[in-house]
Amino acid sequence: MAKGRMPMGMGGMGGGNMQNLMKQAQKMQADMLKAQEDLKTKTVEATVGGGAVTVVATGAKTIQEIRISKDAVDPEDVETLQDMLLAAVNEALRMAGDLSENAMGGIAGGLGGLGGLF
């Protein structure tokens, strides 16, 4: 190799590809921040026990509300209420996770093979 010359692919057009990649990464970062903000306002609702317990969670995986029907409160059977609450919370968080994954997956997919890193 002659002195002062770069091997193929390290100079010239390679810089333009790097600039494009950086622009894509910056756009993806901005899109992800916007999606994260949007997820804070979107909600999912999980209901168990025929409406006895309802849990509302945000797409950011924060429990926003828990509603318990008066019919679900039996002082002689607290364990059933606990089980329903647990099931509703877990389902709401699963749904919120799906919502988040769908929102973020579309953004990260824009980088092709690098999408799995995000």
Image (cartoon, rainbow, N blue to C red):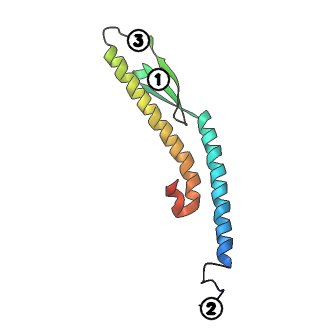
Asked which secondary structure carries label 1, the reply is strand
- x, y percent for residue 99: 52, 41
Which comes sooner in the sequence, label 2 or label 1?
Answer: 2
> Where's the N terminus, which quadrant?
bottom right
- Which dot, 2 or 1, sits closer to the camera? 2
Q: Is residue 113 above or below residue 13?
A: above
Q: Tell which residue pokes out farthest to the bottom in this image.
A: 2
Q: What's the amino acid at mark 3? A: Asp
Residue at image coords 55%, 57%: 109
- Which dot, 2 or 3, sits closer to the camera? 2
Residue at image coords 53%, 51%: 105
- x, y percent for residue 36: 60, 42
Asked which secondary structure carries label 3, the reply is helix
Which comes sooner in the sequence, label 2 or label 3?
Answer: 2
Badge 2 is on which residue? 2
Residue at image coords 65%, 44%: 34
Labels in figure, total: 3
Q: What's the amino acid at mark 1? A: Thr
- x, y percent for residue 100: 53, 42
Which comes sooner in the sequence, label 3 or label 1?
Answer: 1
100 and 12: which is toward the camera: 12
Badge 1 is on which residue? 54
Estimate the spatial distance between the alpha carbons at disc 2 and disc 3, rounded to whole Å: 85 Å
- x, y percent for residue 69: 45, 14
Circle 3 packing at 10 Å, graded few (<14), some (14-19), many (20+), is few
Quadrant position of residue 49 = top left
Badge 3 is on which residue? 71
Circle 2 packing at 10 Å, graded few (<14), some (14-19), many (20+), is few
Residue at image coords 63%, 58%: 25
